[in-house]
Amino acid sequence: MPRIGIIGSGFGALAVAAEFLRHGYSDVRLWERSDAMGGFWRDNTYPGAACDVPSPFYSFSFAPSKQWPRRYAEQPDILAYLRTVAQREGVTSRTLVNTEVRSAQWSGTAWHVTFADGTHEEVDVLVSAVGQLPNPTIPAIPGAGSFRGPTFHSAQWPADLDLGLA
């Protein structure tokens, strides 16, 4: 039985892990650098964060949901859906959080994966499912250094930020 490692824990990682498990591969683990699974939908908590397609299309074919509270589901509902499916498919227990992959090297027979804490693991199959936007990029904006208000990327929205919009 091949040893399978998946980097990430968002929609892509969950889909890959669920398919491996559904096809009888039991030696599957996911490595998530954050303290919880969820990928983009864990990280992006800014006001109004929601999917831009009707919610039923934001479901896995193997786990359709008829429980969406809105036509265009918002971040908390999408994250809850992802985590519910992960639990049901047996992926949650295979997800190692606070486990950042630093490097992966093919030896000719296996992948040697090294983590931020210096430990390492060997797998036969390695899947990168880190998503398109794992590391927000802050552009160089002239004058930004003299701005007196809070500055941040929307993927790092401060939970306690009050914009006075309510």
Image (cartoon, grey):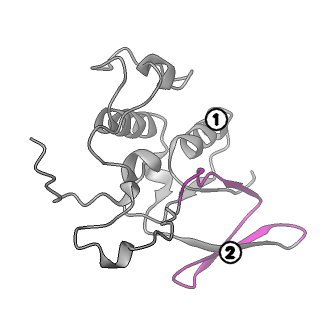
Secondary element at image label 2: strand
Percent position (x, y) of residue 120? 63, 78
Asked whether 129 falls inside the magenta stretch, the response is yes
Depth check, mark 1 against mark 2: the one in front is 2
Percent position (x, y) of residue 28? 61, 51
Instruction: Give me the disc on residue 19.
Output: 1
Asked whether 144 falls inside the magenta stretch, the response is no
Secondary element at image label 1: helix
Q: Determine crowd level at label 2: few under 14, some 14-19, many 20+ residues with C-alpha closer than 10 A.
A: few
Considering every residue shown, the one lying at the far top of the view is 66
Residue 105 lies left or right of residue 108; in this view the side is left
Q: CA distance from mark 1 to mark 2?
A: 25 Å
Residue 37 lies left or right of residue 146; in this view the side is right
In this picture, is 58 found above or below 15?
A: above
Residue 34 lies left or right of residue 133; in this view the side is left
Q: Quadrant of residue 162?
A: bottom left
Which comes sooner in the sequence, label 1 or label 2? 1
Instruction: Give me the disc on residue 87.
Output: none
Residue under the point 43% across and 33% down: 85
Give the residues in magenta: 108-134
Percent position (x, y) of residue 21? 61, 39
Q: Determine crowd level at label 1: few under 14, some 14-19, many 20+ residues with C-alpha closer than 10 A.
A: some
The residue tagged 2 is 103
Residue under the point 33% across and 20% down: 68
Percent position (x, y) of residue 18? 58, 37
Residue under the point 47% across and 19% down: 64
